[in-house]
Amino acid sequence: MTEQISQRSSSSGPFSRGLVQVFTGDGKGKTTAALGAVIRALGHGLKVCVVFFMKGDYPYGECKILSQLPNVKIARFGSQQFIDPTNIKPEEKEQARQALAAAREAVLSGSYDLVVLDEVNLAVAWQLVELDKVIKLIGDKPRNVELILTGRKADTKLIQLADLVTEMLKIKHPYDEGTKARKGIEY
C-alpha cells in the first residue's frame, strides 16, 4: 500500500485535474476546512505546502503540529499584530507580496500536490496583494496541482474561477459576547 501511494505522488502528481477551492465567509472554519484537506492529503502520502498570509510568528497550534509532519512545508508571513485595513503599513504589504511569491513558487515548482493560500482572500480584499496577481497564479497553476484559497471577503472573480466554493456563514459566535480567542480552539 505504501508503495502505491509513493508512486501516485510522483512529479506528475496524483490528480489528472487539480481543482481550485475557495473557503470564504464570516463564519468560523475556513482555515480549519483547508487544514482538514491538508491532513487528508498527507494521510495519502501527498506533498503539501501551506502559505500563511498575515499569520507570521503568532503561536498558532496548527503551525506547530504541521511543522512536525513529513511531506508538508509551512511558509508564514506577517507579524503577531492584527492588520488595520484602514491603515495598511508598507511592511504589511511587503510581507503579503513575499507570501504571494512563495505561493507562486510552490504552485509552479512541481514539488507539491496541494497548495493552500491561507487568508489570501482577505489579503486581496485589503489590497495587500493585487487581485490580478492571484488570478494569474490560478491561470498558471499546473493542471495536476490542487489549490485552496481561504479568507473572508473572497472577490467575485476568484469565486467565478474556483471549482468549489464554500461560504462559512456565521449564525452565532462567542466573540460577539466578548469571549476572547482560546488557545487550542481558535489558534
Image (cartoon, helix red, strand yellow):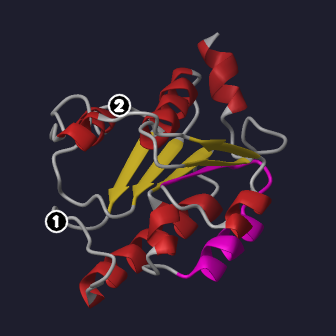
Q: Secondary structure at mark 2?
A: loop
**Split into 4 quadrants, where in the image is the C terminus?**
top left
Q: Position of residue 93 (x, y in %)?
A: 35, 83
Stretch of the chain drawn in magenta: 130-151
Q: Which residue is mark 2?
A: 69
Q: If you read the primary sequence from the N terminus, does the residue marked by circle 2 or circle 1 appear first?
A: 2
Task: Kindly identify the residue that appears in the image at 64 percent across and 64 percent down.
Answer: 108
Report the front residue among 2 and 117.
Answer: 117
Which of pointers 2 and 1 indicates the residue nearer the eye? 1
Could you say which quadrant of the image residue 66 lies in?
top left
Q: Residues within 10 Å of mark 2 (few under 14, many from 20)?
A: few
What's the amino acid at mark 2? Answer: Leu
Relative vertical location of residue 10 with respect to residue 143 in this rendering, above or below:
above
Q: Which mark is residue 81?
A: 1
Give coordinates of residue 130: x percent, y percent: 55, 82
Q: Is residue 2 magenta?
A: no
* Residue 113 coordinates in the image, percent (x, y): 63, 43
Residue situated in front as seen by the camera: 105 or 84: 84
Q: Which residue is located at x 40 percent, y 32 percent?
A: 70
Based on the picture, tell me whether residue 146 belongs to the magenta stretch.
yes
Q: Kindly indicate the quadrant of the structure image that contains residue 17.
A: top right
Q: Residue at x 23, y 36 (%)?
A: 61
Which residue extends farthest bottom?
Answer: 90
Screen quadrant of the N terminus: top right
Element at badge 1? loop
Amino acid type indicated by mark 1: Gln
Tell which residue pokes out farthest to the front in this image. Answer: 177
